[in-house]
Amino acid sequence: MRSVCVQFQPNRVIADEARVREALREALAGAEIDTGEEDGRYENFHFEAASPEDALSKVQVVFDSPNVGRAARASCIVTCQGENGWDDYLLLYHYDRTLIVDPAARPAE
């Protein structure tokens, strides 16, 4: 099992904040949630997944939503423990599309 964190940054989508939050809570039912403020508000959704691909499939439901997908993609970062836990985490998704995500997050070619 891998620990996964979806960080939602509500300040990036003020108009859709409540809808994105609700979609994440629904898709990631049972996730532990912590909130804070460091260079802006954030909400971390922590859950377990069998693999990085499994983790992304849970979040992809929100990213593909016609109602909140665009806002979710503009305000979320998805990370997953690596082989050595959080010491070598994997970046599975980042709202800044110029950043390079780890190979496990890329669709098969």
Image (cartoon, rainbow, N blue to C red):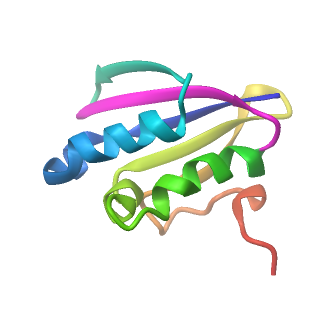
Residue situated in front as seen by the camera: 99 or 60: 60
Q: Measuring 78% from the left and 56% from the top, which residue is drawn there?
A: 104
Q: Quadrant of the C terminus?
A: bottom right
> Seen in the image, is 52 located left or right of residue 41?
right
Q: How many marks?
A: 0
Percent across and percent down for residue 55 are 68, 44
Percent across and percent down for residue 63 are 47, 59
Q: Measuring 62% from the left and 46% from the top, which residue is drawn there?
A: 58
Percent across and percent down for residue 38 are 29, 27
Q: Main secondary structure of the magenta part?
A: strand
The stretch of residues the image draws in magenta is: 39-51
Residue situated in front as seen by the camera: 48 or 104: 48
Q: Quadrant of the N terminus?
A: top right
* Displayed quadrant of residue 106: bottom right
Q: Residue furthest left?
A: 15
Residue 46 colored in magenta in the image: yes
* Relative height, residue 82 to residue 69 (above, below): above
* Relative height, residue 102 to residue 84 (above, below): below
* Relative height, residue 109 to residue 94 (above, below): below
Residue situated in front as seen by the camera: 92 or 28: 28
Residue situated in front as seen by the camera: 20 or 40: 20
* Relative height, residue 6 to residue 60 (above, below): above
Percent across and percent down for residue 2 are 77, 30
Residue 17 colored in magenta in the image: no
Q: Measuring 81% from the left and 42% from the top, which residue is drawn there?
A: 51
